[in-house]
Image (cartoon, grey):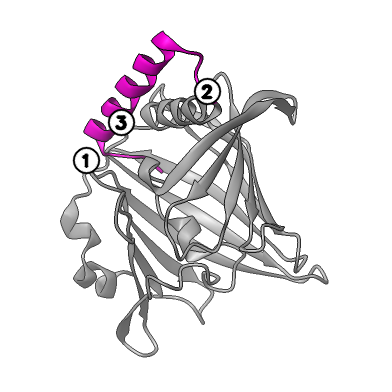
Amino acid sequence: MTDKSLSTSLLALALIFGAVQTHAATAEEKGLTIAIEADRRDTGFVDQTADLTMELRNKQGDTSTRYIHIKTLEVTGDGDKSLSIFEQPADVSGTAFLSFSHAKKPDEQWLYLPALKRVKRINSNNKSGPFMGSEFAYEDLASQEIEKYTYKYIKDEIVNGVDSFVIERAPTYEHSGYTRQLIWLNKAEYRPEKIEFYDRKNSLLKTLSYSGYQQYLNQFWRPDKMTMANHQTEKSTVLTWKNYAFKTGLDERDFSQNALKRAR
């Protein structure tokens, strides 16, 4: 989840630091500064692959499990590209999801449905819908570019024993399913520990919790587990990650609509 608009980030930093020289940073300036630093620390992984177990839990505690292989390509000057390939169970095997994130225009997303042998484009006005029955919305799956939000520093707080910044970000995208999000960012590593999502009525909708972080290539922090709990439906989705690999040689051809149809 990185911002590749380097020139925009540098300009933002210059404006912020220029402002700091003449007056104390506002909450908005401090929030943006923190977001830019978090993004900077996660820039440069080039590409990434991982295996993912998705466990869906309903209100009664019943579960169903899906196994997914995910590929991600870092894009300079824009948002990342990702391809998610469902491997099991049989009823979703071969389903594939392609996402092109963008900094300043709506993300582009497509879903390949093998039973219909066709590619379905996800309407840019309907990104708040659930992804494959999970508690993750389509907009949650795109890389979180800096320009997609406005920012505000709220406070410092300990969460799960970790000293964190709490910043608020509000989507600039008019069709977002959220009015705002609260993010707890680890002060030492600038990685997210928790995110709260507020719906269009500004009521708490979901909480995403991260755990089991490990560092790769002496720079990039990735969680072993992500849990999205929906407070309104009492459903949850648990993502368990393994077999992370970086700089594997992926390129643009691996993220085309033809690649989506060939995904297995």
Cα separation between marks 1 and 3: 12 Å
Cα separation between marks 3 and 2: 19 Å
Q: Mark 3, mark 2: which one is toward the viewer?
A: 3
Element assignment for label 1:
loop
The quadrant in which residue 7 appears is top left
- Mark with earlier residue (3, 2): 3
The residue that disc 2 covers is 189
- The image position of residue 144, as x and y in percent, is 42, 47
- Mark with earlier residue (2, 1): 1
Give left or right: position of 9 versus 30: left
Give left or right: position of 122 versus 215: left
Residue extending farthest front: 22
- Mark with earlier residue (1, 3): 3
Cα separation between marks 2 and 1: 23 Å
Residue shown at the point (75%, 65%) measured from the top left:
232
Residue shown at the point (31%, 87%) measured from the top left:
117
Q: Mark 2: which amino acid?
A: Glu
Query: How many other residues sit within 10 Å of disc 2, few (<14), some (14-19) or many (≥20)?
Result: some
The residue that disc 3 covers is 9
Magenta stretch: dominant SS? helix
Query: How many other residues sit within 10 Å of disc 3, few (<14), some (14-19) or many (≥20)?
Result: many
- The image position of residue 38, as x and y in percent, is 45, 29
The residue that disc 1 covers is 76
Query: How many other residues sit within 10 Å of disc 1, few (<14), some (14-19) or many (≥20)?
Result: some
Q: Is residue 143 magenta?
A: no
Q: Dots 2 and 1: beta carbons under 8 Å?
A: no
Q: Mark 1: which amino acid?
A: Thr
Give left or right: position of 24 versus 210: left
Residue extending farthest top: 21
Element assignment for label 3:
helix
What are the residue bounds of the magenta stretch?
1-26
Along the viewing direction, whichever of 22 and 36 lies nearer the viewer: 22
